[in-house]
Amino acid sequence: MLANYLIGLREGLEATLVVVILVAYLVKSDRRELLPRVWGGVALAVAVSLAFGALLTFGPRGLSFEAQETIGGVLSIVAVGFVTWMVMWMARSARSLSGDLKGRVDVAAAAGGASLVLVAMLAVGREGLETALFLWAATQAAAGTGGSTAGPLLGAALGLGTAVLLGYLFYRGAVKINLAKFFTWTGAILILVAAGVLGYGLHDLQEARVLPGLDSLAFDVSNVIAPGSWIGTILKGTLNFSPATTWLQAVAWVLYVGVTMTLFFRQIRRNNRPSTAPTAPARTPAGSPS
């Protein structure tokens, strides 16, 4: 539940900030008449994301066990790929996000018609589809085979609700937080959560006999950390930890966390490094003495 809350909060806040930037820019540039087009695009993006989540949840039902495990495993790995790309992209492009969005709004507003609806839908829909896929994968991993999805889904709903509330407070200027630090630390946590989802997806593929090594365990601490115990529940809910982990899952987890975390913090350090570009000499006004 905690992991899904963090996913909902982090991914929901990214989408909410996009909406805040679009709305604030139109209001400040005295183009309030265009706001309904932005809200229309946002509504379409939310509807498409919900439909995508429903398709993921109900689509595989009725298929064989192996087919369901194969689909679940593949989609979990795809979700990890999307989230990894988005975490790295935010670390690299957060500073230019506002300027890029405002430029696209100006071009769409000049084009007229449904262009602004399309800009808002694509900007928010990209975040929405990624969030729906990752939440679905994390929920499946947290619930486990035959487990309840109520807790993980409640955590996701609370995270998304908190993100919307924070977005509204940002817009009103009622609250300010250091977004750079927020996205840095939640990005690191998301990488750990994604590593657990990756392990879960690989295990699904092993159960479907797509990948080998289902019975080759790196460790089995089920007698120490029982799956139903409080510590087992916390580790499962936060890191998707499995007391019985295969060698493939363990190696993939270590490699993914080691490589991705290193690249992520390297990008953060690069962003915080002071610019070494030489500053242009001050121009001498025409007619002034040299």
Image (tube, rainbow, N blue to C red):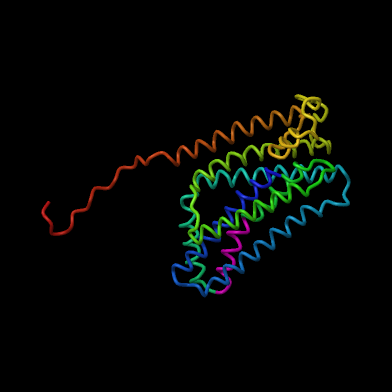
Specify whether residue 266 is painted magenta.
no
Left or right: residue 260 versus residue 32 is right
- Which of 120/4 is in front? 4
Query: Looking at the picture, how far across and down is residue 35, in whole percent?
Result: 54, 70
Specify whether residue 115 is painted magenta.
yes
Query: Looking at the picture, how far across and down is residue 41, in whole percent?
Result: 61, 66
Query: Looking at the picture, how far across and down is residue 119, in whole percent?
Result: 56, 64
Q: Is residue 128 above or below residue 256?
A: below
Q: What residue sits 61% from the left and 69% below the top?
A: 40
Q: What residue sits 62% from the left and 39% below the top?
A: 191
Left or right: residue 204 versus residue 86 is right
Q: What residue sits 77% from the left and 30% below the top?
A: 243
Q: What residue sits 86% from the left and 42% below the top?
A: 66
- Which of 181/175 is in front? 175
Q: Tell me the quarter of the image containing the N terminus.
A: top right
Which of the 4 quarters of the picture holds residue 288? bottom left
Which of the 4 quarters of the picture holds residue 143? top right
**Number of numbered discs visible in the structure rendering:** 0
Dominant SS of magenta comes to helix
Q: Is residue 71 above or below residue 59?
A: above
- Which of 38/20 is in front? 20
Q: Is residue 283 above or below residue 140?
A: below
Query: Looking at the picture, how far across and down is residue 159, in whole percent?
Result: 65, 51
- The range drawn in magenta is 113-126
